[in-house]
Image (spheres, rainbow, N blue to C red):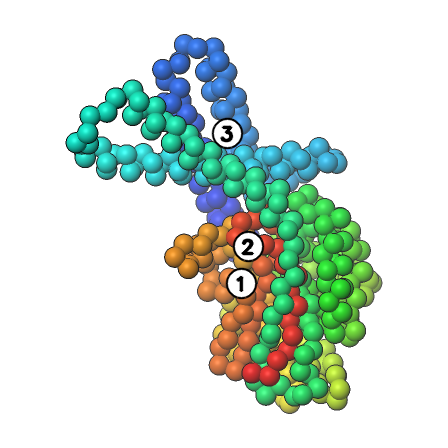
Amino acid sequence: MFQLANYVINAFIFFLVLAGQIYFYRAARRGLAELRGNLGAQLVLILLGTALAGAVARVWLDNFGIHWFWRPLGPVSRGASFAAGIWTAGSAGAALVLLIGALLGRKSGAVHSSEPASPGRREFLAKAAQATAALMPFGAAAYGTLLVRSDFVLREVDFPVTGLPPPLEGLRLALLSDIHFGPYLSSAELTHVVNMANETKPHLTLVTGDLITRARDPLESCLAHLACLRAEAGVFGCLGNHEIYAEAENFAEALGRRVGIEFLRRRSRLLEFGGEKLNLAGVDYQRQHRPYLVGAERMIVPGAVNLLLSHNPDVFPVAANLGYDLVVGGHTHGGQVTVEILEQSLNMARFFTPFVAGLYRRGAASLYVSRGIGTINLPMRLGARPEVALLRLRRA
């Protein structure tokens, strides 16, 4: 059932991209209609059609698991993946811009200007404006892929706890999530992220799932990098939905144990700082079509500060009702591509969860949702920089 839902979502993304590519091609063909007999125009259409077909094929292969097709070897493959991602996002965005322009043009067509103007000049300006607007998504896609995707930020947050004992005041938790180690995140970039976390000198480091994207991604290499994480009381984690997709939950747990990372799978660890107890509990990815956190109340330790690691942040209301003080998670990538309009963040994640990124409170409980490290579907981020979070426990 879970895999079926995933395929339905992927099919929706595929057909959305397919429709955008068809519309973009038809709009370009109409724009070149006057040059139809020109050899150059014919070549442009052929190249455009090939590129659009490649974009559709890329989304199909990427979303339906034939990922190896795009990953022969080395930096050439990585560069080709980035170029394909920029083209896919840019052309889909251009199709949307052209569609909106066409709809607005139809509405304004009924309004006649009172000032005489040259029809030729007006048509030239309209086409120039249309071309400029259509190119903007390509620029945004390139910026998000080549710059923002790897612009890792350290985000420091006060994590409020009601009735926090004084010895736990200021306790530092480094949080990493959604690493998605593979073709879109290099070894050098992951090493940089690990160093960022270590430089905060945390008491605890937490890793909340999605180490990889697919079964063919290098899980062992990812955990070899994460083995370099350093924290006073250890490194703990939980697993995400992509470990389920890859059927790698047990393998990840065993590898983690070997390199010093303890993945808490419906288990808890009681830690002590200055005589006060912090109880870490963890669960595997909580699936939307099942009840959340069944039996998780048994991991709560009375009198301790109880912190739950859950990749899926949607468990927060249930966790708060059960008595957990703190919840950390990820899964959303902060939307990955998000646009701010009238102080509102518009992104795909908002269609699925109210907990997209940052700090949330519910009664006496607090949740922090990481924007994550890596990317999925497209190797780009906009408006949601990848982050290492440093959470400091503070008395609410």
Q: Nearer the viewer, residue 261 or 382?
A: 382
Circles 2 and 1 in contact, beta carbons < 8 Å: yes
Mark 3 — residue? 52
Q: Quadrant of the C terminus?
A: bottom right
Q: Amino acid at mark 1?
A: Ala
Mark 2 — residue? 384
- 389 lies above or below 151: below
Q: Amino acid at mark 2?
A: Ala
Q: Earlier in the sequence, mark 2 or mark 3?
A: 3
Mark 1 — residue? 357
Q: Crowding near pointer 1: few (<14 within 10 Å), some, many (20+)?
A: many
Question: Disc 2 on helix, strand or loop?
Answer: loop
Q: Amino acid at mark 3?
A: Leu
Residue 134 in the figure: left or right of residue 258: left
Instruction: Report how far apart the C-alphas of labels 3 and 1 lie in the structure.
Output: 33 Å
- 123 lies above or below 8: above
